[in-house]
Amino acid sequence: MENKHNDKPNLITNKNDKVVLVSMISGLLSGAIAKIITHPIDTIKAKVQIETKSTEKISHAFSSTIKSEGIKGLYRGIGISVFGSIPACCLYFGTYEWAKKNLLFLNYLENAEFLKYFIGGIIAETVSCLIFVPVDIIKERRQVQSKLNTYHYKNDFDAFRQIIKKEKIRGIYRAYGATIVSFGPMSAFYFMFYEYFKGFFVKNDAKTYWNKINKVIEKDENLNEKININIGFTQSLLCASLASGLSSYITTPLDLVKFRMQVQRSDTSDHAKLLQYKNVVQGLISIGYTEGFKGLFWGATSRVFAYTPTGAISMTVLEFFKPRISKLID
């Protein structure tokens, strides 16, 4: 008799699994925890990237921040970062799970699973940036306002109020396209690398994924009940660290342009005028011409230091909570 589990499932019409909801709930928890832990590192990264020369090093950025602003200088923008990341990460991981769930079983690209993970990452970033971009605008301007001296915000809410008043809705979504161009590939590489590395520790193919989310493994005695499908905490931490480190380094030039476009505004200082880019391509060309090829990777080390723990912690916490949240809502 033919095994019904050999048939290709139609996940788009399957309404019984709760995998997307589980990822959304786990994502909001993991996002908040990761932002709280890594915000000071992200602040240093921002202050290094705002420089147009390689004179600003991580150690100097840290010491000068402590000297001029105190410990609180490392936490500027943390309020909007943490509270904004809750819905944003919820949307981010939920959208990726939805995309992954549906992309894995498309007839075309059938033998290109990792390309589907790549596409899933881009979709997740595009959707979640509806929240991430305004959050980043406020966070990053708060982080570097002591260096640019082009705007003075009392707190995160005051930053939002001033941006809307002076720059309208366009200001709060400044560089949205650049963000998609920057973080779209980063998320794509991140998920692609993570799923690849994860495959070294657990069975991670499309059919096993379907069996897992539809509880087939638990119900079918013909399937190996001891199949390893849930990755361990340490294993996930290693995979996510490698994935976030590689993806953040590769996309540094795109992030550099995106960041400088987000912190710019119309009434800028002489220093900030150097950061005025019309679009990503013009920004890349301008940096390459004025600062050299090495200039495209200014802040690459601080970017890796910032995003590696963020990506590692968020994914590890996500993987930790997913089976537990799944049991609670079953």
Image: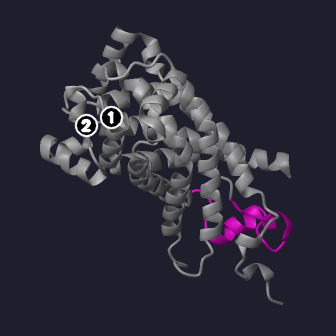
Looking at the rendered structure, the number of numbered marks drawn on it comes to 2
Q: Residue 58 in magenta?
A: no
Q: Where is residue 323 in the image (x, y as percent from the top left)?
A: 74, 49
Judge left or right: residue 322 versus residue 68. right
Would residue 233 be seen by someone viewing this image from the given angle? Answer: no
Task: Name the quadrant of the N terminus.
Answer: bottom right
Q: How crowded is mark 1: few (under 14 residues within 10 Å), some or many (20 or more)?
A: many
* Mark positioned earlier in the residue sequence (2 or 1): 1
Query: What segment is highlighted magenta in the picture?
Result: 201-228
Residue 265 as seen in the image, left or right of residue 89: left
Left or right of 151 on screen, residue 211: right
- Please tell me which residue is depicted at 27% across the width and 28% down the height of the picture: 268
Residue density around tag 2, few if under 14, some if 14–19, many if 20 or more, within 10 Å: many
Q: Judging from the image, what secondary structure is the residue with disc 1 in?
A: loop
**Type of amino acid at the residue the image marks with label 1:** Gln
* Residue depicted at x 48% and y 68%: 115
Residue 221 belongs to magenta span: yes
Depicted 201 relative to depicted 219: above or below: above
CB atoms at circles 2 and 1 under 8 Å apart?
A: yes
Which residue, given by chain and number where applicable, does mark 2 sit on?
275
**Residue 308 position within the rendered picture, expressed as x and y whole percent measured from the top left:** 45, 40
> In x, y percent, where is residue 244?
45, 46
Q: Position of residue 51 (x, y in %)?
A: 25, 30
User: Looking at the image, which residue is at 33% across and 33% down?
Assistant: 265
Q: Circle 2 — which element?
A: loop
**Measured Cα–Cα span from mark 2 to mark 1:** 7 Å
Instruction: Tell me the residue that label 1 is attached to.
Output: 264
Looking at the picture, does residue 127 appear above or below residue 300?
Answer: below
| Kind of residue indicated by mark 2 | Leu
How was the colour assigned to the protein in this rendering?
one colour
> In this orientation, which residue lies closer to the viewer: 231 or 302?
302
